[in-house]
Amino acid sequence: MKSHNFCIILAGGVGKRLWPVSRQQRPKQFIDFFGVGKSLLQLTFERISAIVPPENIYICTSEEYAALAHEQLPGLSDAQFLLEPVRLSTGPAAVRATWHIARRCPEASILAVPADQFITNEMAFHADVLQAFEYVGQHRSFLALGIKAQQPNTAYGYIQRGRAKGRNLYEVKTFTEKPEKIYAETFVRSGEFLWNTGLFLWKAEMMTRLGHELLPGLYHSDIIITTREEEDDIVQSCYPAAERVSLDCMLLEQNQQMDVMECNFGWCDVGSWTVMQKVLSKTSEGNAVVVTPPEQPAEAGKGGRVTFRDSSNTIVSVPEGVATLVQGLNGYLVALKGNVLVITPNDDSARIKSIVTQMQVKFGEEYL
């Protein structure tokens, strides 16, 4: 492990597309969806800590999730949690984290990782990321990690490869975020496009110009900081005024100096029930089950069994302690969590976000 390699884990979202299991009080990154006793955040940290010194890993999350993050990663120091005063997407979070890391190590190479990804080949992931670190250490460019587009998935962004710059390395020619199906089909047939994984690398100095534009209060030349309290005060004062922009948009859509690396690790963005059903273990009929922790601790270990009859390609998520029978449903989501039960077709990853908005307007915040 190299001491100048750093990682920021982006864990501040609310995960609306996995509602009602992902809720405002405990969003998706803090939930064990795979029944392995570890949340998405914990799995991500384990994956990264195999190739980046654990003390060089920072968790970017909202202030309201500070207690959850500390609880799930108790081995990290307080300094490794970079808290956002307000949720402004991943762009400002990445800029703020880079500014913090650069004050510690001006020569830092930084990897940004979303906390909600599913990686099937971790050995290949480690090898690709280490190669990517070497690349950004020697080139003045941002680097995106891409996976060859395999089917016309309209929920992903598509990066078109440009001029070759080395083994599996290319300039970014174009980027299209969540294209319509007809365009996604064309992209896949061409063989020139990679799925955007949301994984990016850069040298700390590369973020300076973007920092001046997005969070000028942090990058002011005469700023002097001697304590973490002073740093937090400055962040509190300037962060809320930043533009709400994703890291993907900031780098890929705003014509930054971008290259892309074609990677070979198996990857999915598990940000929706549609994708979650694809990565979970399934019955021969394509049905899948997520059992979440019980609402009442006394119910732990009681029931939690799901029975399917005349059903296919359906995903069910219920708390432990709840017995469930699903009959005659094909291609559906059935999800129970707390005070919300959702039964809806599971063929559109955007539908849940629309339902959440309707619930908020009709019933209020307590159902989010």
Image (tube, grey):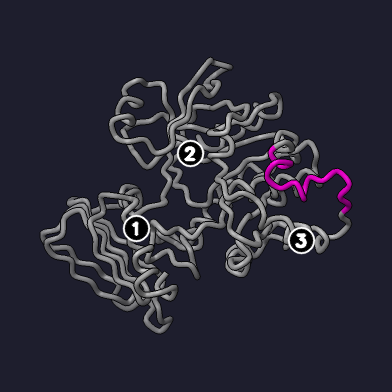
Could you tell which of marks 3 and 2 lies nearer the N-terminus? Answer: 2
Query: How many residues crowd around disc 3 within 10 Å: few (fewer than 14), some, or many (20 or more)?
Result: some
Residue 268, numbered label: none
Quarter assignment of residue 88: bottom right
Q: Residue at x 50, y 62 (%)?
A: 30
Indicate left or right for 337 with 159 as reference.
Answer: left
Quarter assignment of residue 76: bottom right
Which of discs 1 and 2 lies nearer the camera? The answer is 1
Could you tell which of marks 1 and 3 lies nearer the N-terminus? Answer: 3
User: What residue does disc 1 label?
Assistant: 354
User: What residue does disc 3 label?
Assistant: 232
In which quadrant will I find the C terminus?
bottom left
User: What residue does disc 2 label?
Assistant: 197
Query: How many residues crowd around disc 1 within 10 Å: few (fewer than 14), some, or many (20 or more)?
Result: few
Q: Residue furthest bottom?
A: 298
**77 is within the stretch colored magenta:** no
Q: Amino acid at mark 3?
A: Asp
Q: Residue at x 21, y 51 (%)?
A: 286
Could you tell which of marks 1 and 2 lies nearer the N-terminus? Answer: 2
Residue 99 in the image, given as x and y percentages of width and height: 75, 46
**213 is within the stretch colored magenta:** yes
Indicate left or right for 102 with 312 as reference.
Answer: right
Q: Secondary structure at mark 2?
A: strand
